[in-house]
Every structure is written in C-alpha cells, then in structure tokens.
Image (cartoon, rainbow, N blue to C red):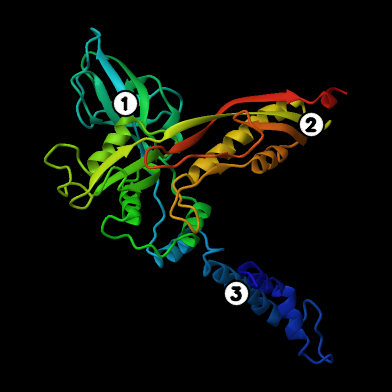
Amino acid sequence: MTPQEYASQFSKYTFDYFINSALNNVPDTIDKREGSIIYDAIAPVALDYEALAIELQNALLMSFTQTATDEFLDYRGQEKGLTRKPATYAQVTATMTDTAGAPAVVQVGDRFSSEGADPFIYDVVTPDDDGKVVLQCEQLGTAPNHYVGNLLPVTAQSLFGTGTITDVSVPARDAESDDDFRARILGTTDALAYGGNIADYQQMVDSLQVTGAVQVYPTWDGGGTVKLVIIDNDYDLPSEELINQVQQAIMPTDDAAVGNGYGLAPIGHTVTVVAPNIRTIPVSFTLTVDGTTDYDTAMASAKQALADYFLDRRKVWGTLAKGSRQYALSLYRSQIMSTIMAVPGVVNVTKLLLDGADADVQMQYTRLKSELPELGEVSISENPANQA
C-alpha cells in the first residue's frame, strides 16, 4: 500500500460520515432531523472531526519522503544529511566606459540597473582597470540568467559613459524543487564522503553553489591527480570565470598551492577543473498531425519538446550509472518519439534520425573526454497526409 493509498482512507471521514454515525446511536424515538436539538448539538463536533481527519491525512502524507512537500521534505532530507539546494545569485561580466570612451572607474558595491520596466539590480564585485567588471545580481534565481545588454548607473558615477553586460559568467539557479530534492533523497547511496573520494569531491563542488553538476575522474593523469568536469547552473558549458572560481576554491593553481592542501582538496591531490566536450546532435523526423492542430504550431511545439528533453538529459549528466562506477548518458529514440508524440495534435513520428543515424546515441566518458549533449539543427518534414 502506497502512502497515497493509505492516506486516501481518511477521505471517507466527512461531516456526513461523523454526524450520521453519531445519529445512528440515537434512539429513533427522538427527533433527529436537521434543526432538531440533538442534530444541532452533534453537528459542530462532526464538523471539527472532519477537519481533524483532514489534518491527520496531511500529517500522514508529510511523514513519507515520497509524499512530503516544502519544509516537511526538508526534514526528511535532514535525516540523510541532505539539505535543499538554495537559490543563488547570477554573476555577469560587463564593460564600463567613461564619457571619453576610456575604461570607467567603478568601486566594489556600486550599483547598476538593467533596462526595462522591471529591471535587475547589480552590485560590483570585482572592478578592473581595463573596464571589465564582474557584477552580482541582487535578485535570487534564474530570471537574470539570460539578460545581456545595457546597464544604467544607480550609484552616482562621475563622467559615466556606457555599461554593457557582455556575458552571464556564473548563471544562477532557483531553489531546488520538491521533485528534484525528493529524487536526490531517494537516490542517495551509502557512499561516505571522506578523504578526497568521489563523493567528497562531489560534495565540495556542490557546496560552492555555482555549478549544475560535476563529474569526478580520480587518477586521470597519474597518482594523486583528479579531474573535475563541471557544467553551470543552466546545465551548459561553464564560462572561464566559473571554471576559475571552482579551480581556486578547490585547489589554487599557483606553484605554492598545488598539492599542498590550499583550498578544499586534500593534501597531495592535484586538481584540474575543466569544461566538458560539447557534442552537437542534429535531429530529423517526419511529423504527422491531426486536423485539430496547425502544422506550424505543432512543429514549433515539437522543437520545444526536443529542447526540453535534451535539458532533462543534461540534468542527470553528473550521475553515476546505477550498479556501476561509470558515468553513462544516452539519448534514446523511443524516449524522443514519446516526447514528440505528447505534443497536442501530433499523431505520428517517423523516420527519426539522431546525428544522422537510426539508432540511440551514447555519450562518451573517459578520463580524457566527457561529452555533454547539445541539440543541433532540427529538421522536420511534413507528412503529405497532413495536406490531404
């Protein structure tokens, strides 16, 4: 019996259930109709009992990881030493110039705003003499992740000319959802994070809150060497700024620090942080739609469904395969067809090719190569039956 099935048993305990149960114990010689003395005396208690049954049903659901939500799911995670991943702040790289076109001088803490009716506010984190500035958004979450454009000064700036965000160097993430956190709790293994093992490095990188996932390759270039392959919070290639942040936190690269225990890495470990290898996968297929949906609308929805599928696969990129000590990630034709078939109005998908072949695609993971799938060109042919 599942928690939902068990909790559903409380659904029968309604106001009618309690008042009828009580009235059945009252002799028929007494008036039991609605509005009678005995009915009016029992009704408030029956109503309270119904509310109590609802509370008991909720308490039961909140006591299981499979059905708990919000703070109750947090409690379940704490029992396994896990906490929900919090939302983070996006960091961006911008160029600043003065009215003469020379690099502008800004200070740590100076504030700038994006354009628009509902702007994002950024604080200067790292100014630079060459006019390149690292700023951090004041708003938590992913909303600022894709803003690239002009900046306006909020803090008064003398002779300020222009400010432009050129790159979202460290994308933010939203707070971990109930579904994602629940999956992480239920998928937790008994691996102990200790002494620089794989679980320890995963925990180190995750604690930085700037990456979406990491793959750990121990002894990749000899004893004591560790390679960390990371992706950003958008589950995409990390920027050089993000790679450098993780590298300096885990093991600074100056000669005095390498292998000497400066940073989070254990003494004796030489850590290299890199980005994965992008593998672009074109997809082509023939689409058949019914008479309820415009073909162009179905085609656009199919492309979005494909993009969502690739994103979902990248979200598990850093997970070790079950029953194995290897990373494994495949793109399955059957799953892609099911994803497209779920688009409203689509009745059939044929001639599906992934990377030009009628076969599933498996990413390669070795000590030298770690592939991250990216959706390439999507070519959709219209079934002539759509035009009949």
The picture quadrant where one finds residue 232 is top left
Q: Amino acid at mark 2?
A: Val
Nearer the camera: disc 3 or disc 1: 1
| Residue 206 in the image: above or below residue 170 | below
Nearer the camera: disc 1 or disc 2: 2
Report how far apart the C-alphas of labels 1 and 2 lie in the structure.
45 Å
Q: Amino acid at mark 3?
A: Leu
- At a point 67% along the width and 77% down the height, the residue shown is 46
| Disc 1 secondary structure class | strand
Q: Amino acid at mark 1?
A: Thr
- At a point 30% along the width and 48% down the height, the residue shown is 219
Do the numbered discs 3 and 1 sit on residues whose CB atoms are within 8 Å? no
The picture quadrant where one finds residue 118 is top left
Q: Which residue is mark 2?
A: 289
Q: Residue 6: where, in percent of width, then height?
A: 64, 73
Q: Residue 321: where, in percent of width, then height?
A: 49, 53
- Labelled disc at residue 305: none
Query: Mark 3 or mark 2, which has the lower sequence index?
Result: 3
Q: How many marks?
A: 3
| Disc 3 secondary structure class | helix
The 10 Å Cα crowd at callout 3, few under 14, some 14 to 19, many 20 or more, is some
Q: Which residue is mark 1?
A: 93
Do the numbered discs 1 and 2 sit on residues whose CB atoms are within 8 Å? no
